[in-house]
Every structure is written in C-alpha cells, then in structure tokens.
Image (spheres, rainbow, N blue to C red):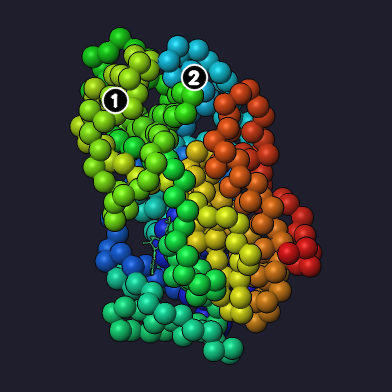
Amino acid sequence: MSSGNEKIAIIGAGLGGAVAGALLQHAGFNVNVYEQAPSFARLGAGIHMGPNVLKIFERIGVDQKVKDISSTPTHWFSRDGITGDYLSRIPLEGYGATYCTVHRGDLQAIQCDALQPGTLHFGKKLARVEDSGSDVLVEFEDGTSVRADIVIGADGINSRVRETLLGEEKPNYSGWVGHRALISADKLKKFDLTFEDCVKWWGPDRHMMVYYTTARRDEYYYVTGVPHPAWEFDSTFVDSSREEMASAFEGYHPIIQALIESTDTVTKWPLFNRNPLPLWSKGRLVLLGDACHPMKPHMAQGAAMAIEDAAMLTRCLQETGVSDFGTAFKLYEANRRDRATRVQTVSNANTFLLDQEDPSWVYGYDIYAEPLKSEYAA
Ligand code: FAD
C-alpha cells in the first residue's frame, strides 16, 4: 500500500538517505530529502557496494549506472602484510548481482539523481525536530521549517534525530584511525609489481585495504586501520603524510611501500562506533544507517546496511501505509535489528574474510526475498 498525501521528510542525503528517498518515491510516497551541505560535492574516497546492495539499486534503476563507473573485482584477496602470502581468496561473483568498488562521491551523485526533481533540498541543516503527536515540525538552521507526517533520520553518526530520541551522547572512539589516499594509477606503472583489484593486507594490529574506484582503473585507493590511542583533534579528519604512513607500515610488503611512495596526499580519520541502540524509532521519528548502527568500516558494509535499512523501511511502509507508521516501524526494526547488529559486531571485530570463509550470508542476501517477520519480534 502506498500513499500520495502523507508527507515523509528524510534528514540527510548521504548514502542511506538518498536511496531511501528514491525507493519511497518509486513506491509512490510523497518524499522530500533535506541535506545540510550547501550543494553537491564529490566527498569521500572509495567504497565497496556488494551484491546485496546492487539488488536494491535494481529497484531504482541505477544498478547499470553504478556498474558502468565502478571497478568490478572478481575476488577479495587477504594477504599477509609482511610476507605477501595469501590468507584467503574470496570469490566475489555468484551472489546474484555484481560486486562494485567505486568513488563514494560518484556513487552519491547517481543516487541523488534518482530522486524526483525538486525533492532534494540542499543547505537545510536540521536544528530541531518536534513530534506533536499529530505530525512533526522540522526546523532548519536557516530559519525555515516544514511539517511532515513522519521523519526518517538518515543524518549519519552524529544524528540530530537520534539525539532527539535518545539524548546527547558522543559516539565511542574505537582507538583506531583510518588513513585514506587516492593514487593516480599512472604513478604505479613504474613498479614491476601487480596491483590487484581488491586486496586487504593484514598485519598483527593494523591493515590496509586497497582497490580501484573507477571502471577505467585509473584511480587506486587505500584505507587503513591503525591503532591510535586518542583522537586529539576537533575536526572530522586531519592531514597525514607519506612519512607517517612509512613509519606506520615500516617493514611491510614492497607493494605497500610502492603505494606509500606514490601517495601525494593522505588524510587520517578517527573510527567511531556506538553500542546497539535501545530503540530505532519513537512516535513519528525513525532512524536508519549510521544514525542507528554506526560501525568500524572494516567489513565495507556500513553504507550497505544503511541502504538495506532504506529498502526494508520502504517495504514495511508499503505493507502498512504511512498512517500506520507505528506498525511499519516495529516491522522494520524486527526485520533489520539482528542483521545490522551482526554486521556491526563482525565489522567492529575486523575478522571478515581474513580466512577462507563463505560470505554468502552478507553478499547473497536479497532483502526482497526475505519473508517479513512479525512486528512483535522487535
Ligand atoms: P552518511 O552517508 O554519513 O550521510 C549522512 C548525511 O546526513 C550526510 O550527507 C550529512 O551531511 C547529512 N547530515 C548530517 N547532519 C545533518 C543535519 N543536522 N541536517 C541535515 N543533514 C545532515 N561503508 C560501506 O558500505 N562500504 C565501504 O567500503 C565503506 N568504507 C568506509 C571507509 C571509511 C574510512 C569510513 C569512515 C566509513 C566507510 N563506510 C563504508 C561506512 C559508510 O561511509 C557509512 O556507513 C555510510 O556513509 C552511512 O550512510 P548514512 O546515510 O547512514 O550516513
């Protein structure tokens, strides 16, 4: 069941919010998306989109566009960071859709383009949200406001909507940072080395995940996980340096040394997480993605969980209509909590695909093929 009149407001046009908007609009709902950024920017660096996500992209007709701009690795290799020995060779084909690695900004542009014209509003930073019981007042920092029947908080790890539901609480610093660098593939040509499509280099307490972010394989990307006792900076990331990278990965494999030598700029990001939340919705407000279950990024499934949330929330609202949002939100949580928490736990532990394991439970999952569990399981 879909609806034409009741209004849905989504806060945040990140990787989960934009897809939620497009899926709900395809299902016939009246949706507007409000994003704090003043305009679209090619933010971020590399991101994996597994077959579990590509199956959802088919629903909004963007799967081919994403495949066209992505690198599509056939395997995830895990290798010993020092000796280069293969610890696992995980096939990425055979899960019902393609495995893509891509630039986050390019992906987000495709997602935002899938929204109906005029429904994505930039420069709208949520200041306050108030559930009156009969609707929701959404106030932005620019002094404007809108009213909606339900509000979806897709506003990321520091979610204002989460704060309204559960109070102010900073996310937990995990004790790890991630260095991120994009390298022009031209720079790698001088080395007599093979740079694989998707490989994770593992050390005893640190790692480096490496892959291409374009179909042309002209941009190679690495992201690390390195212990760092405290995040002493105010900003969301700081500049790192080739020297810092060389010291963090001293004695590691020649391919890692080649990547560091080819690095022009590298940034350093704190990795945060939260414990599973006691509730995912209250009244007319509901959360998805990092607002709800942020995780360390080591399984490359954080955005995937946001997008799966978007698909399940849409499915549940189609079952009930917006007017019975209470049942829809319970159904949504009942059908998402276990999987999102499992992925959050494995991702935080950083063990995924280290050994030769079967990842079908992640990649083979088809959110549309799962029977809906009763709302009373929430
Ligand atoms: P976001 O994508 O963070 O979007 C939130 C949006 O809300 C933003 O656009 C923000 O501007 C907006 N917003 C925030 N506050 C407000 C406000 N008050 N008003 C209006 N708008 C607001 N995940 C993967 O699936 N694969 C990967 O390979 C991967 N690699 C990662 C690597 C690193 C180093 C990190 C840190 C994360 C990685 N992730 C990966 C995780 C992934 O980036 C997040 O899980 C994902 O972006 C979450 O999507 P989201 O929509 O919940 O939040």
- Quadrant position of ligand 1: bottom left
Residue at the spot x=44%, y=73% of the render? Answer: 32
Amino acid type at circle 1 is Ser
Residue furthest out toward the top: 192
In the rendered image, residue 195, in percent from the top left (x then y), is placed at 37, 19
Question: Looking at numbered disc 2 in the image, what kind of residue is underneath it?
Answer: Arg
The 10 Å Cα crowd at callout 2, few under 14, some 14 to 19, many 20 or more, is many
Does the Cβ of the disc 2 residue fall within 8 Å of ligand 1? no
Q: Quadrant of the N terminus?
A: bottom right
Residue 284 seen in the current view: yes
Q: Of marks 2 and 1, which one's residue comes earlier in the chain?
A: 2
Q: Residue at x 26, y 46 (%)?
A: 238
- What residue did someone put label 1 on? 247
Residue 244 image point, x, y percent:
26, 31
Kindly indicate the quadrant of the structure image that contains residue 146: bottom left
- Look at the numbered disc 1 and give the secondary structure of its residue: helix
Q: Is residue 34 above or below residue 213?
A: below
| Identity of the residue furthest to the front in this view | 229
Above or below for 367 versus 161: above
Q: Which residue is mark 2?
A: 79
- Marks 2/1: CA–CA distance: 20 Å
Q: Position of residue 182 (x, y in %)?
A: 29, 35
Foreground pick, 37 / 166: 166
Secondary structure under the numbered disc 2 in the rendered image = strand
Q: Quadrant of the C terminus?
A: bottom right
Looking at the image, residue 312 sits to the left or right of residue 110; the answer is right
Q: In the displayed structure, would residue 171 be above or below residue 82?
A: below
State the image coordinates of residue 356 (x, y, percent, origin top left): 63, 22
Crowdedness of circle 1 by 10 Å Cα count: few (<14), some, many (20+)?
Answer: few
Does residue 213 appear in the picture of this structure? no
